[in-house]
């Protein structure tokens, strides 16, 4: 994986404060597939009211940019698309934090997240089905070929024997059949 210690700057602290999270996006695609460069980590988080203050304490301003408690609480209160960033000052590495809100796919992913060991530390990853479905949605929205490439590499990394029933069900539920067909015919 590409500099896993950089995303561990964030997950280590989330583990320490006991915040329920899952790593997704390019870092998860790298974990399930094959290495590529990335300059950030996407993290989906379930925050309770008291977690905002604990986050600010876990990411001190000497080392990190972390929004004030009021901003985090405001984003936590959103039903959809709550979001904020954390940035490590010394490296410039960024964590895009997405809050679960009332997003059914976020809820499913959090309920099925997979803990794994990375450099002797536990990191909770979104299940591969979640990562693939989100990347299909992002591809539909923006058309970036990197999502097709990431999914194709994930499928290779997961192997032929990886069961696809749940993935196929989610693709159907989210009406992503056309995008899925593009993945299946994609050549990188």
Image (cartoon, rainbow, N blue to C red):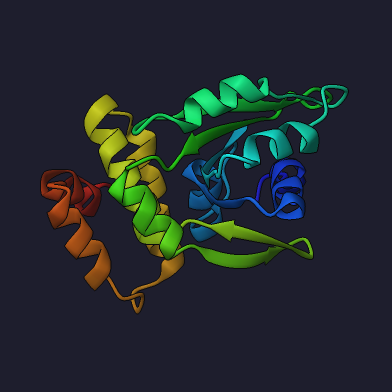
Q: Nearer the viewer, residue 123 or 37?
A: 123
The spot of residue 149 in percent (x, y) is 38, 44
Residue 32, percent from left and from top: 50, 59
Q: Nearer the viewer, residue 71 or 183?
A: 71
Residue 154 percent across, percent down from the top left? 42, 57
- Location of residue 184 (image quadrant): bottom left
| Residue 56 in which image quadrant | top right
Question: How many numbered badges does the structure rendering display?
Answer: 0
From this viewpoint, which residue is outermost toward the right?
62
- In the rendered image, residue 41, in percent from the top left (x then y), is placed at 59, 38
Q: What residue is at 50 percent from the left and 42 percent from the top?
A: 26
Residue at 34% x, 74% y is 160
Task: Tell me if residue 139 comes above or below residue 134 in the rendering.
Answer: above
State the quadrant of the C terminus.
Answer: top left
- Let me know if residue 188 appears in the view: no
Name the image quarter holding residue 6: top right
Residue 96, can we see it? yes
Say which residue appears at 41% left-offset and 46% top-offset.
150
User: In the displayed image of the protein, which residue is found farthest to the front?
Assistant: 50
Left or right: 39 in relation to 154: right
> Residue shown at 24%/28% (left/top)?
141
Taking 75 as reference, is 125 above or below it? below
* 135 with respect to 93 (left or right): left
């Amino acid at each position: 994986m590409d500099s896993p210690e950089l995303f561990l700057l964030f997950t280590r602290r989330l583990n320490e404060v006991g915040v329920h999270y899952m790593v997704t996006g390019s870092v998860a695609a790298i974990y399930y597939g094959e290495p590529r460069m990335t300059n950030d980590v996407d993290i989906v988080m379930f925050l309770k009211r008291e977690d905002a203050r604990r986050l600010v304490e876990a990411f001190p301003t000497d080392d990190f940019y972390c929004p004030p408690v009021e901003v985090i609480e405001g984003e936590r209160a959103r039903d959809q698309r709550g979001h904020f960033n954390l940035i490590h000052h010394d490296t410039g590495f960024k964590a895009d934090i997405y809050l679960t809100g009332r997003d059914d796919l976020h809820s499913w992913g959090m309920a099925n997240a997979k803990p794994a060991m990375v450099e002797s530390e536990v990191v909770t990853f979104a299940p591969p089905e979640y990562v693939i479905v989100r990347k299909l949605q992002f591809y539909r929205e923006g058309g970036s070929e990197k999502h097709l490439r990431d999914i194709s590499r994930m499928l290779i990394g997961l192997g032929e024997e990886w069961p696809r029933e749940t993935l196929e069900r989610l693709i159907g539920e989210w009406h992503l059949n056309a995008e899925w067909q593009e993945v299946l015919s994609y050549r990188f």
